[in-house]
Amino acid sequence: MIAILNRALSITLLIALVGCGVRGPLYLPTVPPVPPAPLEPEPKGALYPPQTPATTGNPSSVKQ
């Protein structure tokens, strides 16, 4: 019983040391700086940018 536990522990340790195939040095990724906050708030209540009035006819129903 103890031999089985020793072998299981050895195999587990070996797999952990292999690191699942990860190669190269470990490093922390560089995080880009946070963009600055906008100086003016977004406009509320109106579409931005303003849109032109839509056409009244449906283009798919217009006969040519």
Image (spheres, rainbow, N blue to C red):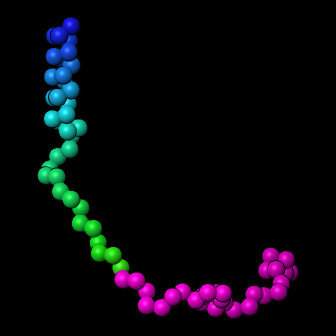
Relative image position of residue 50 (x, y in whole percent):
64, 91
Relative image position of residue 57 (x, y in whole percent):
83, 84
The quadrant where residue 21 appears: top left
Q: Is residue 22 left or right of residue 39?
A: left
Residue at 29% x, 72% y is 32
Does 5 appear above or below 52?
Answer: above
Does 13 appear above or below 3?
Answer: below
Residue 26 lies in the magenta stretch: no
The quadrant where residue 38 appears: bottom left
Residue at 20% x, 12% y is 4
- The main secondary structure of the magenta stretch is loop
Most distant residue in the left direction: 25
Q: Is residue 7 left or right of residue 32?
A: left
Relative image position of residue 10 (x, y in whole percent):
15, 22
The quadrant where residue 42 appears: bottom right
Residue at 20% x, 44% y is 22
Residue 58 lies in the magenta stretch: yes
Which of the image's four quarters has the C terminus?
A: bottom right
Which of the image's four quarters has the N terminus?
A: top left
Does 17 appear above or below 39?
Answer: above
Relative image position of residue 44 (x, y in whole percent):
61, 87
Does 45 appear above or below 27?
Answer: below
Residue at 21% x, 59% y is 28
Q: Is residue 49 left or right of residue 53?
A: left
Magenta stretch? 36-64
